[in-house]
Amino acid sequence: MSVISLLRRGALALAAGLLASTAAFAQSGPLVTTEWLEKNLSDPKVRIVEVSVEPGVYERGHIPGAQNVVWHTDLVETVSRDIASPEKFQALARKLGVDKDTTVVLYGDSNNWFAAWGAWVFDIYGLRDNVKLLDGGRKKWELEKRPVATNPVAVKASAFTVAEPNRKLRARLTDVVATVEKKSDARILDIRSPDEFSGKVIAPAGFQELALRAGHIPGSVNVAWARAVNQADGTIKPVEELKKLYAEAGIDGSKPVITTCRIGERSSHTWFILSRVLGYQVANYDGSWTEYGNVVGLPISNPAGTVWTGK
């Protein structure tokens, strides 16, 4: 065999190895690409889960093999304002065919807000390293005109056993108040829009879950969730850009972080970025402004001067 042939064979082998390592990296990190997922749609160890908020979006067309999870019934307690109980989550995971050695790819509409909420709940109950977000979610998948299906696919139930809840991942009102009173060194990161943060509006137009007061938690800093994604396709920005973005607001991983928004869905997206992508210590405050802003006797900050009406 000639030297040229050997070099060519070596180059081909190197290229194949790089492609394989790229796919492995995509699976080992917290995000998977649309390319990787399409190549692994038939992998029996991969479970795809859609968590969207718009009614009927899953039924109109979803990623082939995806199971449907309805966040406001499947991932929460429908009577008490709480995340799904351990028993309810265990039953859901078994129904989805998910176990601790399963690679779970979550995606959804609204820039993966509720898919990230799902990743947060999965993490609380012991499913973390093998749980990924599809970078760009439904938006990117549809933009690229990748395959969709309209019929759900039955999967074999698993024998998943739920873990003791990891309470460090969830901030409660008492944790937030401790920070406001400077009894905790945690930083509160409010990821709502600047108008919500200032109190100019209570919530984005069309949203029904409201607080009586407008403004933000005293001492919190504001980095709107949308600044962390590429607007064209909803993908998450590179790590170095993310670090710079949050560091400019004093969030650099040196202190624990509490993420907050209106009801905890947008803040779970930022929780995922800070916790899973950047590796910071982060708890998501799912009570968020609809809890804090409605509590009698708690101080708020309202630069816009609206306080009660948001007008």
Image (cartoon, helix red, strand yellow):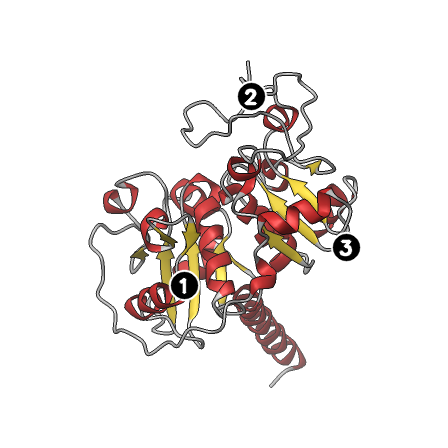
Specify the amino acid type for callout 1.
Answer: Lys
Q: Which residue is mark 3?
A: 255
Q: Tag 1: Cα neighbours inside 10 Å, few (<14), some, or many (≥20)?
A: few
Give the SS element for disc 3: loop
Please determine whether, in this image, residue 280 is positioned above or below residue 165.
above
Q: Which residue is mark 1?
A: 39
Please determine whether, in this image, residue 79 is positioned above or below residue 88.
above
Q: Earlier in the sequence, mark 1 or mark 3?
A: 1
Kindly indicate the quadrant of the structure image that contains residue 15.
bottom right
Q: How much space separates mark 2 and mark 3, taking CA atoms?
A: 30 Å
Is any atom of residue 44 visible in this view?
yes
Q: Is residue 237 left or right of residue 150?
A: right
Work out whether residue 2 or residue 257 is closer to the camera in this orientation and state it. Answer: 257
Q: How much space separates mark 1 and mark 2, taking CA atoms?
A: 44 Å
Give the SS element for disc 1: helix
**Where residue 122 appears, x then y in whole percent?**
46, 63
Is any atom of residue 238 visible in this view?
no
**Where residue 237 appears, x then y in whole percent?**
63, 46
Q: Residue at x 39, y 69 (%)?
A: 46
Q: Which residue is mark 2?
A: 201
**Where residue 260 appears, x then y in whole percent?**
59, 43
Q: Quadrant of the C terminus?
A: top right
Kindly indicate the quadrant of the structure image that contains residue 191.
top right
Please determine whether, in this image, residue 76 is positioned above or below residue 36.
above
Work out whether residue 215 or residue 192 is closer to the camera in this orientation and state it. Answer: 215
Work out whether residue 192 or residue 63 is closer to the camera in this orientation and state it. Answer: 192
Specify the amino acid type for callout 2.
Answer: Val
Q: Is residue 144 left or right of residue 9?
A: left
Q: Earlier in the sequence, mark 1 or mark 2?
A: 1
